[in-house]
Image (cartoon, rainbow, N blue to C red):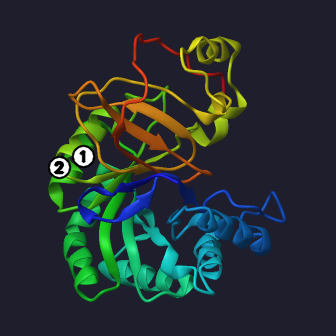
Amino acid sequence: MLYRVLGKTGLNVSAFGLGVMRMPVTDPDDSKTLDFERGVEMIRYAIDHGVNYFDSAYVYHGGRSEELLGAALKDGYREKAIIATKLPLSEVKKPEDMDRMLNTSLERLGVDHIDIYLMHGVKMERWSALLEMNVQGFLDRAKADGRINYTGFSFHDNFNAFKKVIDDYDWDMTLIQLNYVDERFQAGIDGLRYAARRGLGVAVMEPLKGGTLAKNTTEEVRRIFERAPVKRTLSPSGCFCEHRTNTPARSLFHSSFCFYTCGNKPQSYMAVLCFGGGVCFVDNIARREPHTQKRKLKQPAA
């Protein structure tokens, strides 16, 4: 397993992170019917093989995702894991709701602190409402009283909004959507660069667009992978891809395995490694082969 330092947190995170969002259920029509036996087995298998970053949220699986993660981290596994979970901004109607939902997450997880606490699904309208409720004060208090160690936010708006949210608080990390067909979507590559310049750890969600890039790989895309000078042992669903950027990023990702060329030195790489519908981490690693050509990829049909 490869590991990365998650921005200014100093946490040594596995390059693969496991998202506890699309876990096995006993009834496919009811996300609350988690199969705890299979879910615990999956999480512990990941830990036993070097994964240490686990991403959940207050609302995943109707709240049962946090319960599942808490169950999996018993019997000595908590000490081997970094827990990230999220506050649902859409459910914050008054300042007291933030404390209430954080305390509920702690109870569900069965822990006395959360390693990384994120604001969930930040958009400018929601963020403006939270500013009026002094969300910065809430985060400061939760860090001071030991309920959370580090702060972050997941993001679903445009690049200008992303910059404002980053500038509004002293965040430790952020979670953005990024994959090889969505470089200019939402925060995108520009947001990745901006966050990196500010010292934030960067986690990536949806590197396979919820499985779309794995399930609907077109013949054209397959031929591009096959023409690559370095032959991969994984199928295109492994999402090996290279894209030039100009700014080093030091962080993580969830749900596939990508390489984005990165940095202002030719030997610089940013590894984007993802796992299981969750989170990945990005960082610089030694360059392994030259990037010689750019190709435009058409987005697969939904």
Which three-letter amino acid code belongs to the residue tagged 1? Ala
Residue 214 visible:
yes
**At 28% across and 62% down in the image, what residue appears?**
129
Residue 122 visible:
no
Which three-letter amino acid code belongs to the residue tagged 2? Arg
Q: Secondary structure at mark 2?
A: loop
Q: Secondary structure at mark 1?
A: helix
Kindly identify which numbered label has been placed on residue 195: 1
Quarter assignment of residue 3: bottom left
**At 28% across and 82% down in the image, what residue appears?**
142
Q: Does residue 93 appear to the left or right of 221 in the view shown?
A: left
Q: Does residue 155 appear to the left or right of 142 in the view shown?
A: right
**At 50% across and 72% down in the image, what residue appears?**
81
Quarter assignment of residue 12: bottom left
**Mark 2 crowd level (few <14, some 14–19, many ≥20, 10 Å Cα):** some
Locate residue 158, reporting x and y percent: 32, 38
- Residues at marks 2 and 1 touching, judged by CB atoms closer than 8 Å: yes
Q: Does residue 123 appear to the left or right of 225 in the view shown?
A: left
Locate residue 137, reporting x and y percent: 19, 76
